[in-house]
Image (cartoon, rainbow, N blue to C red):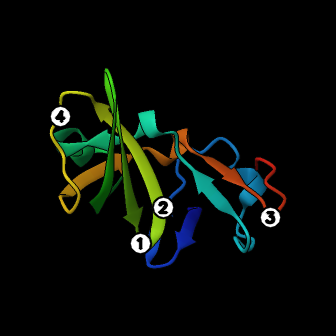
Amino acid sequence: KPVFKVGNLSIPLTGYDFTQKVGKGSMDGVTMGVRPEHVLFGELAKKAPFKADVTVEVVEPMGADTLVWSELDGLPFRFRVEGQLQLSSGDVVSIGFDPARGSLFDAEDLRI
């Protein structure tokens, strides 16, 4: 089964449409992107194929939505929550996502 490894994280790529291009080759220089709206939060995150806890760094209210800036294993990670949700810097929250909805990019920033 293909896995995207970065830092201490192992993110399963089951269901990712382009795993045949990734194969069992090196992931050196490969970056994974996940749209902020595809990240699940709180109770919904428990059902996601990949889950983790992150610490909130910055909360950016944008009306109906709020963007949350955090780090995932030392890497920048952003996600979106509903605008009425009260979060503060320093809060530890559960997030999750389906890696099949993400995108992998090679060292030249081309989608794999």
Residue depth check, mark 1 versus mark 2: number of the one nearer the observer: 2
Mark number displayed over residue 110 = none
The relative height of residue 109 versus residue 75 in the rendered view (above or below) is above
* Label 2, label 3: how far apart the Cα atoms are: 18 Å
Split into 4 quadrants, where in the image is the N terminus? bottom right
Residue at 31%, 20% (x, y): give it: 64
Q: Tell me residue 62's x, y (percent).
A: 37, 29
Mark 1 or mark 4: whose residue is earlier in sequence: 1
Residue that mark 4 sits on: 85
Residue that mark 1 sits on: 73
Q: Tell me residue 90's x, y (percent).
A: 20, 63
| Residue nearest the observer in this picture, 15 or 52 | 52
User: Label 1's element?
Assistant: loop
Residue depth check, mark 1 versus mark 4: number of the one nearer the observer: 4
User: Label 3's element?
Assistant: loop
Residue 16 in sight: yes
Label 3 crowding class (10 Å Cα cut-off): few <14, some 14-19, many 20+? few
Mark number displayed over residue 107 = 3
Residue depth check, mark 2 versus mark 3: number of the one nearer the observer: 2
Label 2 crowding class (10 Å Cα cut-off): few <14, some 14-19, many 20+? few
Q: Tell me residue 72's x, y (percent).
A: 40, 65
The residue type indicated by label 2 comes to Pro
Q: From this viewpoint, which residue is outermost toward the right?
A: 108
Q: Residue 18 vs residue 54: left or right?
A: right
The residue type indicated by label 3 comes to Ala
